[in-house]
Amino acid sequence: MQELCPVNWLFGKCVWQNVLFFYDSRGRLMGSTSRPSTRSDMEAIVLACAASKPELGQFRVADELRRRGIQISPSGVRAIWKRHELETLYKRVSAVEKHRSRTGTRMNDAQRARFERAEHRWELLKNAGVDSRRGKSDMRRRHLLIAAARAFYREGYKGATLKEIAKAGGILPGSIYHYFRSKEDLFVQAHNEGFKDLNAAIDQALANVRNPRQRLEAACAAHLGLLLDDGDVLAGFTGNSLVFTPNAGMLTKRLLKVRNAYEARFRTLIDVLDLPARIDRTQFRLALLGALNWTRFWYKKGKKTPSEIARELVNIFCR
């Protein structure tokens, strides 16, 4: 099938419009009528590939063109895409989908499947506030952890499946093993990342506070700030484990190290408080952490802030 790639309608800056690509019955690119003689020609060819085959990445596009005598590196492909804000799969397919929604044409099954995975990744990163300054691998690992935290929280360790997590994370099931050795490893790393977020929040909250009681209030407020209002999916998942620890043998033992280290921070804060002798500081700590994490089940946004709840809980426990 011969098809004129719709460069001009998709990318207004293109000046080279007469690029023809030929496809076999399986939709594979077969050739082009001419080779680029100018930078504008090369840019138009790369953008034509994005328009006709948005699911292909920079390496695949460079390889396809190289087979037809058009020499460009993967980084060169990406540089052109970035100039037109098409450097991600989501952006490329979104641009094509917007045009096709107007013309009534549809993506094929392969394009639709990849678009849906990319859309999952985009939504996870956007809603969870993932730092775009992270490296690409770190970002993918982070949004897989977020997808896993949601699945484990909803289904439990035994009920959640890697297939479900992969789909929610926008990747193929086998790709999970590039980042995590096993389901157990994914579960533990999700907790570790959540505790990392909680510790960072407390460090920031305590930086300029000296009064012992105010320090405990600040730590509690930081803890609640991540757990409530969907502030941090991983921290919320971790906080839930402080209430409901899974009874899974070695898995539980792997969680205890980071969990105990986090609880030790509250032990230190409570030990320096001026409390009546009748108060058992261990029971104080355990009950306070339980109360903090249980707020997720009754909290309603708009009534009291995390800081107000933290102050009232500390007041109750310090009586």
Image (tube, rainbow, N blue to C red):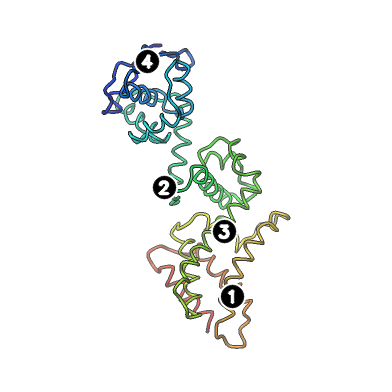
- Disc 3 secondary structure class: helix
**For the point 61% across and 48% down, which residue is it?**
186
As drawn, the label of residue 238 is: 3
Q: CA distance from mark 1 to mark 3?
A: 20 Å
Q: Residues within 10 Å of mark 2 (few under 14, many from 20)?
A: few
Q: Earlier in the sequence, mark 2 or mark 4?
A: 4
From the top left corner, tell me how far across and down residue 99 is, in percent. Answer: 31, 28
Q: Earlier in the sequence, mark 3 or mark 4?
A: 4
Q: CA distance from mark 1 to mark 2?
A: 36 Å
Identify residue for label 4.
Answer: 35
As drawn, the label of residue 145 is: none
Q: Residues within 10 Å of mark 3 (few under 14, many from 20)?
A: many
Which of discs 1 and 2 lies nearer the camera? The answer is: 1
Which of discs 3 and 4 lies nearer the camera? The answer is: 4
Q: Is residue 44 left or right of residue 262?
A: left
Relative to 189, is 284 above or below?
A: below
Which of discs 1 and 4 lies nearer the camera? The answer is: 4
Q: Earlier in the sequence, mark 1 or mark 2?
A: 2
Residue type pointed to by label 2? Lys
From the top left corner, tell me how far across and down residue 271 is, in percent. Answer: 59, 79
Residue type pointed to by label 4? Arg
Relative to 211, is 71 above or below?
A: above
- Disc 2 secondary structure class: helix
Identify residue for label 1.
Answer: 268
Rendered-image quadrant of the N terminus: top left
Q: Earlier in the sequence, mark 1 or mark 3?
A: 3
Identify residue for label 2.
Answer: 126
From the top left corner, tell me how far across and down residue 278 is, in percent. Answer: 62, 87
- Disc 1 secondary structure class: helix
